[in-house]
Amino acid sequence: ASSRSPIRKRMTDFMNTFTSALTPGHGKGKDGATGNEEAPPPILWLHCKQKDWDAVRADVSKMGGDHDAVVEMAKTYHEKDLPIHVASRNQAPEDVVRGIINLYPPAVRERSQ
């Protein structure tokens, strides 16, 4: 059994997501959206999938120190969807949807792959 704390696990997952999302050669779609089905889901996408709206709010607001990496997560496809698609499908609160759109405005024109 693992004795890793939940916070440490989240940070490890977060860093692994950044590493995979920023890998050179990562496929680019329309408007610069990226897609890599083999990569683990970006933490923003995962929080939307889990309907963890407080975590999404934290992803959007507290990562201001590395804004480019957060934007990269907002435009990274996983399982053929952007985080905005997952949030919308899961009936995210309006402030969550606006936060994701503010990170990557072209997402409103993107379709699932």
Image (cartoon, rainbow, N blue to C red):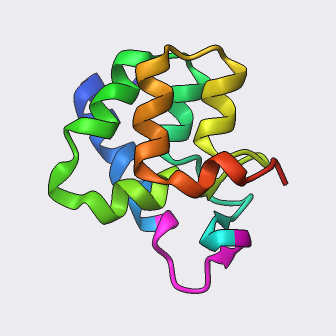
Residue 101 placement (x, y as % from top left): 49, 42
**Front in this rendered view, residue 52 or 12:** 52
Residue 60 placement (x, y as % from top left): 33, 38
Looking at the image, is 20 positioned above or below residue 61?
below
Looking at the image, is 25 positioned above or below residue 78?
below
Residue 99 placement (x, y as % from top left): 40, 35
Which corner quadrant holds the N terminus?
A: top left
Q: Quadrant of residue 61?
A: top left
Residue 2, visible in the rendered structure: no
- Residue placed at 43% from the left, 17% from the top? 53
**Front in this rendered view, residue 98 or 72:** 98
Q: Quadrant of residue 32?
A: bottom right
Furthest toward the right, the residue is 113
- Residue placed at 35% from the left, 24% from the top? 55
Q: Is residue 83 left or right of residue 99?
A: right
Q: Is residue 97 left or right of residue 12?
A: right
- Residue placed at 73% from the left, 71% from the top? 30
Looking at the image, is 63 positioned above or below residue 7?
below
Residue 22, visible in the rendered structure: yes
**Front in this rendered view, residue 95 or 55:** 95
**Front in this rendered view, residue 6 or 57:** 57
Q: Which residues lie in the magenta part?
A: 20-30
Queried whether the magenta region covers residue 6, the answer comes back as no
Q: Is residue 31 left or right of residue 13?
A: right
Furthest toward the bottom, the residue is 25
